Amino acid sequence: MSLRWLALGDSYTIGEGVPPEGRWSHQLAARLRAGGIDIADPRTIAVTGWTTDELAAGIDAAEPLPRDWDFVSLLIGVNNQYRGRSVADYHAEFDGLLRRAIAFAGGNPARVLVLSIPDWGVTRFGRDSGRDPVQVAAELDAFNAAALEVCQARGVAFVDITTASRVDADAGPMLADDGLHPSATMYATWVDAAEPAARLLLEPGAAAHPLA
């Protein structure tokens, strides 16, 4: 039977503006299958605009969920920053979500993968928003540092896709039609960053060796 994947997040996980096969998660699943890892496309719990507390509520609404997923991914936080919420609140709420993600993976942190928050400030939408892109970048870096700290404390793999999100981010091929969300082409660069970690977590025997 194929490995089962639970993907938790917001617009970046639901793939706002792209078809399902263009989402980073579906692209990653396809690459893993092509490389010999039999994993199904993910069950996704994600809605555009969700913050950490809204994702938690969304998980509650979706329950009862199994506690034996083979793989769980988490990408959340951009809307916390966008709405001006504090890093301290994000740290606490992200920790709660990560603990739930680990529980969904049967209590095994070595089957959980976290992606960093991408930088929306460098997009066409960000440029036209009136927000200072330097400040947006600094705030997102602080949120990502908080997420990394929690991941390290809980032995969960953390992948930086923020760097990739800042490369040619305002170029047409990298953006969906709304000028904010990534295109399938941009998502593919995230998969380049995430695939090695995902493969390491999912190869036979890897689950006994969590990444910090």
Image (cartoon, rainbow, N blue to C red):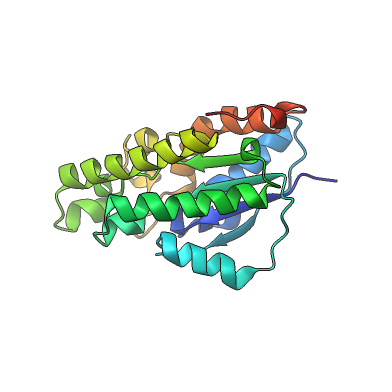
How many marks on residues?
0
- The residue drawn where x is 71% and y is 50% is 69
Residue 100: horizontal and vertical position, in percent? 58, 54
Relative placement, left or right, of 117 versus 1 is left
Q: Looking at the picture, how far across and down is residue 166, in whole percent? A: 31, 37
Q: Taking 78 as reference, is 188 above or below it?
A: above
Horizontal relation, residue 172 to residue 161: left or right:
left
Q: In the rendered image, which quarter is residue 149 located in?
A: top left
Residue 56 visible in this rendered orientation of the protein: yes
Residue at image x 48%, y 63%?
Answer: 55
**Residue 26 visible to the viewer:** no
Q: Residue furthest bottom?
A: 61
Q: Is residue 196 left or right of residue 133?
A: right
Q: Residue at x 55, y 50 (%)?
A: 99
Indicate the position of residue 22 as horizontal and vertical percent values: 55, 50
In terms of image quadrants, where is residue 145? top left
The image shows residue 185 at horizontal and vertical percentages of: 47, 42
